Amino acid sequence: MLTGASGYLGGRLLDHFNRQMPAWKVICGLPQNLNDIQLDAIVHAAGLDAVNCARDPSLANEVNFRLTSQLLQNAAINKIRQFVFLSTVHVYGAPLTGVLDEKMAVPLPLHPYAATKLAAENEVLFYTKEKLLNGAVLRLTNAFGAPMSPSIKRWELIVNDLCRMAVTDGRLHLRSSGRQLRDFVTITDVCRGVEHVLENDLVGLFNLGGELVLTVREMAELVAEIAESVLGFRPEIIVNDDVQEKDWPTFAVPIDRLKATGFSLLKNVQVEIKQTLLFCRENFALNQPI
């Protein structure tokens, strides 16, 4: 069962499962009674995004924590073997700094999105410790890629937003100097990571990043370079030098624990950017606000 299949990440997961794992039967949504259906695993991708969590922390707790807790309880009662929860690297704090190893780095969430995700993580790991099910938590870094539909509004994500601006405005406007560091991972690699966890019945806590730490400005340069071949012109990059920023701390999000189980990244960054630009070109027009 896949929750959140009509959303951004869930939609891409559903498409990936349908294409890459045709023998799997995927049920979407949140059935009221899990004992009415036979399930081997649940992938829980439903949740409130960071923007809406900040707007309504109470709703964030209801959706991101309480819904997960209820789903875990139902899964345990109905003896569903596997539960995969998609979390965020931002549980480590903001800004991210140092080596963010799953065992050594202490979570310090400073945002309702991260805080509610961490609370849900703890529930998954508790059920696993009690041997009520096999739970896996994946802490994702900055995932990017085209959504399955233009109706899915996830243009606040940095790379998606840069691709959108290249098509609709012809320029890449950065709201800052672009010195912030981010770890970027393609949605293709996220989907492959979830598939790997399911196939190998993995248990525990895993980082899932792209092993690609760039500044926002460096990513903008990469998008502009790829846009030149896709769109026929190189978008101008406009930075906001009026924003005074301290030196951005360096960090790393190792995924050694997941790689030790046999997982490897495609690192198809250029391909994912190109596909996102093509998606935007197909669905949006120049000077069309989104």
Image (cartoon, rainbow, N blue to C red):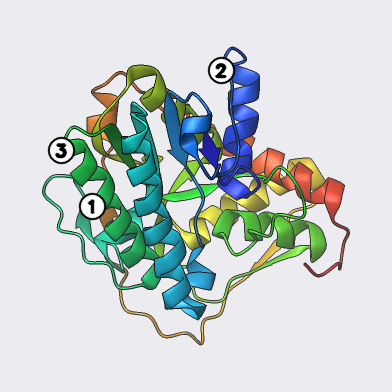
Looking at the rendered structure, the secondary structure element under dot 3 is: loop
Q: Earlier in the sequence, mark 3 or mark 2?
A: 2
Q: Earlier in the sequence, mark 3 or mark 1?
A: 1
160 relative to 290 in the view: left or right: left
Task: Give the labeled residue for mark 2.
Answer: 24
67 up-or-down from 59: above or below: above
Q: CA distance from mark 3 to mark 1?
A: 12 Å
Asked whether the beta carbons under mark 1 and mark 2 sit within 8 Å of each other, the answer is no
Q: Position of residue 112 (x, y in %)?
A: 38, 72
Amino acid beneath label 2: Trp
**Mark 3 and mark 2 residues within 8 Å of each other at the beta carbon:** no
**Of circles 3 and 1, which is in front?**
3
Q: Residue at x 81, y 47 (%)?
A: 231
Compared to 62, does 120 lie above or below?
above
Drawn side of residue 102 relative to residue 140, left or right: left
Residue located beneath label 3 in the image: 130
Q: Is residue 242 visible?
A: yes
* Crowd tier of the residue under label 2, counting other residues whose Cα lies within 10 Å: few below 14, some 14–19, many 20 or above: few
Looking at the picture, how far across and down is residue 151, in whole percent?
Answer: 76, 55
Q: Please tell me how crowded label 1 is: few (under 14), some (14-19), or many (20+) other residues with Cα within 10 Å.
A: some
Residue at (60, 28) in percent of width and height = 16
Q: Which amino acid does the dot numbered 1 rest on?
A: Asn
- For residue 101, above or below residue 269: below
Whether residue 252 is visible, yes or no, is no
Task: Give the residue at mark 1.
Answer: 122
Mark 3: amino acid:
Glu
The CA span between labels 3 and 2 is 28 Å
Q: Residue furthest top?
A: 23
Q: CA distance from mark 1 to mark 2?
A: 28 Å
